[in-house]
Image: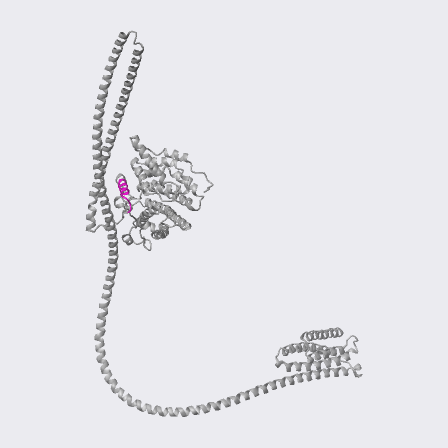
Amino acid sequence: MNINKNHPNTVNLNQLITNIPVRRKIVDQNDRDKFEWNQWQSATKAVNNIEAAPKEKHIRNLILGTFRLEGSRLFWSMMIRVNIGSHPVASWKFCYIIHRLLRDGHKHVIQDSIVLAIYFDQLSQFWSGVQQGYGLLSYRYCNLLISKLKFHERNPIFAGNLTINEQNNDIRRIFDDNFNLYFQLCIELFDYMEEILNLVQVIFTSLDQSRLNSMTAAGQCRLNPIIICIQDSSLLYDYIVKVLFKLHEGLSSDILQDHRRRLADQFRRLKRFYGQSSTLQYFKSLIKIPMLPENPPDFNVKDDLTNYQAPVAIVNTSASDSSSVVEGLLIDISDNTKSTARTTVNDDLFDNETISNRLQDMPDFERRFSQVNTMLDQTRSETDDLHRTIAGKDAELMQERNHRLRIEEQLRQQLSNQKSIEEIHALDNKTNSNEKFDKLLETYNQLREEHFVVLRRENESKKELTDFNQQFTKLKEDSTKKENEFNQNYEKLNNEIFQLRQTNDELQDRIQILTTERNDFQSITIKTNERIREIEHAKQSFEERLKELESDKSRLHSDKFTFEQKLKEAEGERSDLFHQNREQEENLIDLIHEREVLEQKVIDLEETIREWAQKFIDISDRQKLMQANHENLLKNLKRQYKYSILTYCINQMHDGIDQTKDIDLFNSKRSKEYLLSRLQIAATSTKTIHDLWQRQKDSDESDTLSFLNECIALANTMTDIIVHGKAIANLVQDINYRDVGLYCIDLYTNYQTSSTPDDIDQQSGQFIHRLNSLIEKIKTVCV
């Protein structure tokens, strides 16, 4: 896989590890080397690029190492040599091992890892560019570890497995009534839960995308952290709910609205997470997944706290081997921690006598645990002393063996010297044999004495070595005997502890069952009380109704007696009415007969009415036709009358024009004032005629007669004007009245032919203008 980023800097990790203190050392070098080699084997087998879940025995061994050294410095020192960023699978498994160490390891592991939070941040940034596979999983897991370390740094009261040291593990008592601290703690719990849900979502998404099965090695490699997430999330949800109940006791509901909304969202996601996990076959034999209710608690109702049941995740340890049980026991004894599957219950759940009696035995169990721990420590110290004694005896044996080798070397040198003497004696046999013999004899005696001394020392050494071997054999037998006794006691204690664990688990299961039964009984009791109250209320209502019915019954008895009296009277009246009814029926028959006769008459009348109505309709149609003909006839008569009148006026004006040809008019003298008055009358009459014409043109038939009368008057006036104007024209040459008369005749002709209103208006105006001109000229002549 090619990633465009640099690998995490191991130099920085090495520098950070130097800040982790060394709290405990193994004195014996061989023991230390053996322990470190065993830890290295477990670390390399647990953190590698093989797509398979790490074996539990390797993880247990690493956890035991943190308890033996009281910290995680050795583990981090080994991680420097493991190239974590070289492969995403190795990084994923490394994060899981760290999570297990933080949760189940020694309490100092969290303190040691807090200073290394910057390394997880760097590793998270390294895998942030990968959006699929184990790279994305490692990125989310690093964010979860960072959130966990920050949470424990700010809240040291929580252990690595999220348990607290307060009594009954009740989170509502750690800060008393300091609601500010509870408010901040609730936000941090929400953030921690958010990172767990994000990691779980990515795990299931990658599992679906890869189409892996939970029973395959690759699927189990991805699903392995789910068990820890279930354990942590169940406790976090329990803490969040209890903290919110605590906050609602001292803060208003509006301030905590965002907290409730955030809890509702995480509750929905957590419920889906538990549902998805419960469907996988891989988890059914490993952990009992808790069940959540349909809805989160209602924090505005205080009774919901008493009905609330904490979700409990129980890890199944029955499938583990005996060595795993022993290792788990050593972890629990060294750290004095409690089981992760502990049940957080309310204070009022321990009222049952049987459970209280069983719980009273818990101090005895704890005291026996402490005694076993003391015996184990003593046995371990005695074993260490025996090993040290054996090591000292081994060193003495080695020294004695070296001394024996030196003596043997000296003897070999002496023998070689003796051989050289013999060679010299053979060479100088002929000369100075006596002297040489004496010297050789002296040398031989000296060597013989030295040899005796060496033999004595060798015998003494052999004797001491025999004594040492006997002591060593005796010590070895004693050590073997004590070791066998220790193993027997150890197995016996393990069996007792295993039985105590089973008893404790049974107690916890029994407590949970009794808690569920008690809650069910409480809910049933509440419902029963409510039902009893309803029944009592119904009983009171029934008694009141019964009293009312009794009173109604007595009233009905009196009414019944009265009704019987009235019934008797009604029977008498009924008989009378029966006779009257018979008479009325006879009368009714007669009336029915009469009605039939009348109905026949009505039918005949209706037929006659229909005939008369048809005749009336025909007459009305004829009348309307005659009326229409009459109206048309009247219109024609009016039109003919109007035409004849206008023709008469035109003829009269033509007669006036013809009269101007009479010679007598040239000799006659007329009055100018009379002509002026007639012209003024003509102008006025012309305006009146024009107005009357417009009104009768607008369908006002009442003005037609006035119009015709005015036309006759104007014609007479114009005849006088023409005749008198001719007489005056003999005196004044500029005045021509004949044209004015012809213009008036044209105007009448337009009235007669019904010309357009514009033409008539124009001609009428011009005619009036001519009359006014004549009036002005006459006035000028008169002056």
Q: Position of residue 474 (x, y in %)?
A: 20, 30
When the figure is inspected, residue 86 is found, relative to residue 436, above or below; the finding is below
Would you say 20 lies left or right of 434 here? right
Q: Position of residue 153 (x, y in %)?
A: 34, 40
Q: How many marks?
A: 0
Of all residues, the one furthest to the front in this rendering is 430
Would you say 443 lies left or right of 694 here? left
Would you say 609 lies left or right of 472 here? right
- Residue 664, magenta (yes or no): no
| Magenta span of residues | 319-330
- Residue 328, magenta (yes or no): yes
Q: Position of residue 166 (x, y in %)?
A: 27, 43
Judge by depth and name the residue closer to the eye, 295 or 634. 295
Q: Residue at x 24, y 51 (%)?
A: 510
Q: How would you classify the magenta stretch by its main secondary structure?
A: helix
Would you say 40 lies left or right of 451 here? right
Does residue 615 appear anywhere in the picture? yes
Judge by depth and name the residue closer to the eye, 236 or 220. 220
Q: Position of residue 623 (x, y in %)?
A: 57, 87
Does residue 374 appear anywhere in the picture? no
When the figure is inspected, residue 395 is found, relative to residue 719, above or below; the finding is above
Q: Residue at x 23, y 41 (%)?
A: 491
Q: Quadrant of the C terminus?
A: bottom right
When the figure is inspected, residue 754 is found, relative to residue 299, above or below; the finding is below
Q: Quadrant of the N terminus?
A: top left
Q: How is the image coloured?
A: one colour
When the figure is inspected, residue 506 is found, relative to residue 625, above or below; the finding is above
Judge by depth and name the residue closer to the eye, 506 or 47. 47
Figure quadrant of residue 554? bottom left
